Amino acid sequence: MKMINKHYWVVGQVTRAEVMLVGNGGGHILGMFESRGLAHIGNEVVVVTSWVQGDLLNGNGPIRGYTRYMYEDGSTIISKTEYTCKSNPESKTHLYENGYGEFLSGSGRFYGIKGSSSWKGRQVTPISDETKGDWIVEGDMVYTLPPE
């Protein structure tokens, strides 16, 4: 099997956020977030949707969830995703570090995919009624596909 490497970037926005304050005070939250954006992977534009949960103390902590990459031909990749969210000391936004995704399944031309992605990025605007939490990440995918 041939190993395929693709560099990518994604620009997106938080489309839904549900946040609960943890009773111990001090900026501790549990959050569920849905994001949607456009990726440039190889020579293709791909719609990326993520559903993640976070356990954050003052904006810092682990984020885990799932991401779907949907290609123009209808092919998809589903990834289990995790990364570290850190407060950006220069703004009211966050840095996304140690991003990792394990490909769980694929459909269409990605049926039988095995591989992973790694990335880092940042939130460009805070989550508010006006800006919705715009973000950008950049990374690399490495995967194999079964022989045809």
Image: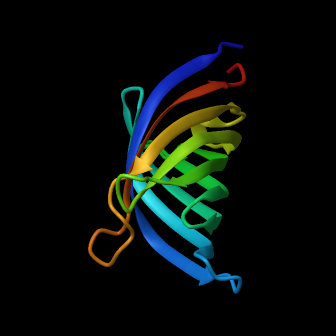
Q: Which quadrant of the figure has residue 119?
A: top right
Toward the bottom, the furthest residue is 23
Q: Is residue 29 above or below residue 48?
A: below
Q: Picture quarter containing residue 24? A: bottom right
Q: Is residue 109 visible?
A: no
46 over 3 or under it: above or below: below
Identity of the residue drawn at 50% across and 24% down = 6
Question: In the figure, 115 relative to 73: above or below?
Answer: above
Residue in the picture at 47% in, 73% down: 16
**Residue placed most toward the observer, 3 or 51:** 51
Question: 45 or 14, which is in the foreground?
Answer: 14
Q: Identify the residue at image location x=52%, y=66%.
A: 34
In the image: residue 136, left or right of residue 95: left
User: Where does the image place residue 58, in percent across and percent down from the top left?
Assistant: 56, 67
Q: Residue furthest left?
A: 130
Q: Position of residue 106 (x, y in %)?
A: 65, 42
Q: Quadrant of the C terminus?
A: top right
